[in-house]
Image: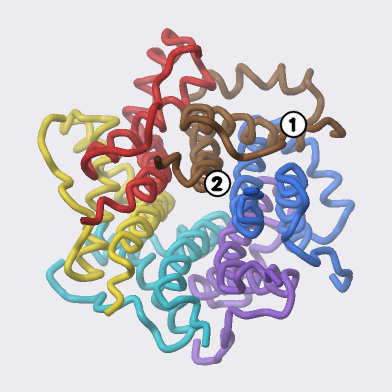
Chain colours: A blue, B brown, C red, D yellow, E purple, F cyan
Amino acid sequence: MADQWLETLITATPQAGYELAITLSRRGVKYTQPDPEVLHKLRPEYANSADALTAASQVIAINFQTVAAANNYWRK
Amino acid sequence: MADQWLETLITATPQAGYELAITLSRRGVKYTQPDPEVLHKLRPEYANSADALTAASQVIAINFQTVAAANNYWRK
Amino acid sequence: MADQWLETLITATPQAGYELAITLSRRGVKYTQPDPEVLHKLRPEYANSADALTAASQVIAINFQTVAAANNYWRK
Amino acid sequence: MADQWLETLITATPQAGYELAITLSRRGVKYTQPDPEVLHKLRPEYANSADALTAASQVIAINFQTVAAANNYWRK
Amino acid sequence: MADQWLETLITATPQAGYELAITLSRRGVKYTQPDPEVLHKLRPEYANSADALTAASQVIAINFQTVAAANNYWRK
Amino acid sequence: MADQWLETLITATPQAGYELAITLSRRGVKYTQPDPEVLHKLRPEYANSADALTAASQVIAINFQTVAAANNYWRK
């Protein structure tokens, strides 16, 4: 995966930080399974399972901890 | 998801912080499965499963760590 | 859930902090499934399962991290 | 659970801290299922399952993070 | 495992830090199951399972927390 | 378990720290199931399961967070 996709953890707003946490979570999946066709086929498996959606939200929450700390919680 | 839903991690009280952690947890699900109809159909699947409810509480706990740290634990 | 249940993360002792972590963990369940009858019916499902009890202890452990940090670990 | 079982997070050594983390993990189970007979019956279910033992070790690891931070990692 | 594979947690960029987090996650697997043939046989089992990919992403997220903190979040 | 196995969290290198995190993870299992014969019988169950190996790597990642923080991330 030669492309550059993560230049900084700093974001302008908490919401942009949350969305960066989503990107980080998806990248963890893509590094493990880089084939976009396989990922596309797996999509209904998790997008229609309550357990899988909760698990996805948990990974985002863990990454959001990192991004929020990096931004000093966007405190003024 | 163009709407703005997260302007700050700062809340007036710990309870408001806990409720923000719930919002963060639900958003993680909605970003992954944005279709409200699918989410509605999945609701009984997790709201009636002890394991799923514990998992939901765990995601909230992780997000609450972030919100509590952002608020310096609401120490006086 | 209009009632006020979380006024502070500060507790007098580590044990009171651990018990607050239990409260936080249970609230995460109640916010997701507010019907007390459903919760009552689910109780045997998790109280008699080793996996479910370990999962419950894990959520408490995560919330205890937050409460302990808030109290500066009750260091003298 | 009226007894007092957690007076401090401070321990003399890292190993005593690890053992306190085990105590914390077991208490999380006991608060959820206080009946010692049920707990006794569940024991073979998790003590003979690789997944359950890994899950138990994970809860200990989370509690050990808390105890280690409380002790400033026993740095000299 | 006599070889040296981890000399520092410091990386030049956040992306290199994320990739180090992937290395750390894979090493955790290899220390537990060092036989490359077994690992090769297990690959389709997790690379084609949405749940397994989410779990892999979660381990990366936890290791990324460590690497990001080590690098002080690559703040300028 | 009377023997002394954890005298310090301080290690000379990050790799030694990672290996200490593995020790901590295995000890969590051994405290819960001290019988070496049972542990030996369980070994194929997890060493040949992708899910179990990922879970093992996750426990190591959590313990590595603790060890890395204790060592101030081995920053020079």
- State the image coordinates of residue E41 (x, y, percent, origin top left): 66, 66
Q: Say which of B8 and C51 sits in front.
A: B8
Q: Chain of mark 1?
A: B
Give neighbour class at mark 1: few <14, some 14-19, many 20+ (Cα, 10 Å): few
**Residue at 42% across, 10% down:** C36
F71 with respect to A4 (left or right): left
> Which quadrant of the figure has residue E10?
bottom right
The residue wearing badge 2 is B70
Real-space Cα separation, disc 1 to disc 2, in angstroms = 17 Å
Residue C47 in sight: yes
Q: Determine the secondary structure under disc 1.
A: loop
**Residue at 52% across, 64% down:** F57
The disc label shown at residue B5, or none: 1
**Residue at 28% across, 64% down:** D71
- State the image coordinates of residue A30 (x, y, percent, origin top left): 78, 58
Disc 1 residue type?
Answer: Trp
**Residue at 69% across, 68% down:** E18
Q: Quadrant of the N terminus of chain B?
A: top right
